[in-house]
Amino acid sequence: MASSTKPVYRQLEDVVGCKWSVSVLQAVAAGIARPGALERHIQGISTKVLSERLRKLTGYGLLSKQIYAEVPPRTEYSLTQNGRKLLLIINQIRTLDDEIRDARSES
């Protein structure tokens, strides 16, 4: 019997499986909070892809979105607690990858 909702791990894969998601999360963690600044900071990302990634990362609960009632309106993103946890895991994976590559180059 097929389910109409994706299993949770499939949702996570859909959100972070894109090559841009990690870059967006890392940029927000570095304090780059506004969409225009993110687009300038993340080399090669298009406005469309950035908007989609921000929407997915926010929808999944890894980013929070704050809209300020100004003219023109200002939008800023920040990491949620789960977003910070995921970045810790990503950094652990990066460390493991470095260790594996170092071990391969020594052999």
Image: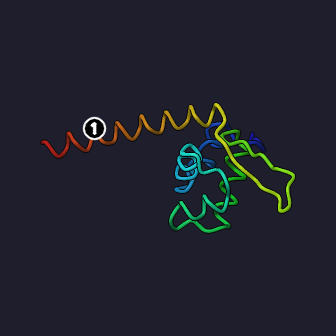
Q: Is residue 40 above or below residue 1?
A: below
Secondary structure under badge 1?
helix
Q: Left of 3 or right of it: where is 49?
A: left
Residue at 58%, 34% in the rendered image: 84
Category of crowding for the residue at label 1, using alpha-carbon neighbours closer than 10 angstroms: few (below 14), some (14–19), many (at least 20): few
Residue at 55%, 50% in the rendered image: 27
Q: Left of 30 or right of it: where is 11?
A: right
Q: What colouring method underlies this structural image?
A: rainbow
> Residue 23: where, in percent of width, then height?
52, 52
> Residue 37: where, in percent of width, then height?
62, 60
Count of labels shown? 1
Q: Which residue is mark 1?
A: 99
- Residue 82, image quadrant: top right
Foreground pick, 34 / 57: 34
Residue at 68%, 67% in the rendered image: 48
- Residue 50, image quadrant: bottom right
Q: Left of 90 or right of it: where is 61?
A: right
Residue at 82%, 50% in the rendered image: 68
Q: Left of 10 or right of it: where is 67?
A: right
Question: Of all residues shown, which one is farthest toward the front?
Answer: 71
Amino acid under disc 1: Glu
Question: Of all residues shown, which one is farthest toward the left?
Answer: 107
